[in-house]
Amino acid sequence: MPSIPSRARPRRLLPWLAGPLVLLCAVLMAACSTTTGQSAAAGTGTLTPAQRKVLDVGFAGVFQKPPTEGPAAVRGKTVWFISCGENFEACHTMSASFTEAAKKLGWHVKVVDSKYQASAANTAIGQAIAARADGIVTAAFDCPQIKSGLLAAKSAGVPVVNYAALDCDDPSFGRGKPLFAATLNTMGSTKTRDYYAERGRYNAQFLAARLAERGVHSAKVLVVKNVDQVIHAAGWDAFDREMATACPDCQLVPVTWNVTGFPNPASQIVKTALTANPDAAAVAYDSDSFMSGGFASAIRQSGRRNLVVCCGDGQVSGTQLIREGIVTATSLIPYEYDMWATADTLNRIFSGANLASLPNQGGGFIYVDAQHGLPAKGAAIAVPVDFKAARERVWSGGRS
């Protein structure tokens, strides 16, 4: 997803997630242990069993189900949703999906477009408090960036739920006091960096397997990354570390850019990297909003049609680029699923739930390419969990 600039940088990655991610970890560890030394000779395109498993599991989807019990809808609430930037496809998907879920809960939602500016998000939090909002949701703003707003909300007793960002108690920020009422519990962790690191590891395994399909085991990979936000930096750090094992003879070429410089000079930076590295075999990226907004044009202009380009975040624009032959595969971050989960989290807070015992909301990711799971043109990638029906049964007072 698009990220918001942050002064802080991660000091280290947190350990692998336990419990809910054991199966995924096992897949990755198996791939790590068998890829090195067992790769087929260059040109044969033969996959090891571990590489095949990485692809099969990725295409099937690594997903967990939502909770089956919870409070009925606490209706009549007014919630402000502070979008990371409506001009980005991912951010708009978030706001639209949250609004859809909120209507099922009987809430009124006001969406505020921050245009990926932390100052605008802080102002919006203050306006929400003044307007006597019952709750606030922020997307992709780390706690230190909106600290003054969060302090004001805490003082006013207005809960702020965090999605796709880190609280002030993260080690990257010196382990301060947490200020969000809650952060979405995704796949068993409320530490958002865990999810992004897990995807980064899997993206590395997936990309290495796609290269192996072509008989490529020694490749130059352009890693097009913005590390403005800590979770994205954590994801790319995990990707780099995993690639060292998944494709030990690959050379990673970092192509870094800043989100405030998108689409230019960011797109020019990508174009320059493609020109300077005509022998590159792959391009790694993590947001379809950025790919469709400028990076795809750079690839088109380069004339390179034989690149392995992966893995995005599974937006409609990404699947269209698969049809056009620009992108090889994209990996869905299920923003719609996550926004319904965020709405459920806030509903639990409204119902008086213990903040320390908010449940795992499930979630996951799934890969799509031209032969696996590609949706109809203009349609979203299908999630292998009927999360809407499950949540509506809970909100109506029943059970999933």
Image (cartoon, rainbow, N blue to C red):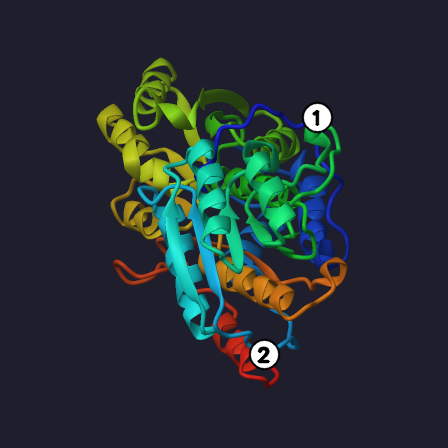
Spot the residue most to the bottom.
398
- What percent of the width, then of the height, locates residue 333? 49, 51
Q: Amino acid at mark 2?
A: Ala
Q: In the figure, is residue 87 to the left or right of 155? A: left
Q: Residue at x 62, y 45 (%)?
A: 192
- Decide if residue 237 is on the left or right side of residue 121: right
> Does 271 sit above or below residue 372?
above
The image shows residue 328, relative to residue 184, as above or below, that is: above
Q: Amino acid at mark 1?
A: Arg
The residue under label 2 is: 72
Q: Nearer the viewer, residue 212 or 263?
A: 263
Where does residue 26 sit, x and y in percent of width and height?
A: 72, 52
- Observer able to see residue 373: no
- Residue 24, given in percent of the width and then of the height, sits at 67, 53
What whole-number distance in Å separates the C-alpha atoms at marks 2 and 1?
A: 41 Å
- In this view of the protein, can residue 299 be seen by the observer? yes
Q: Which residue is mark 1?
A: 11
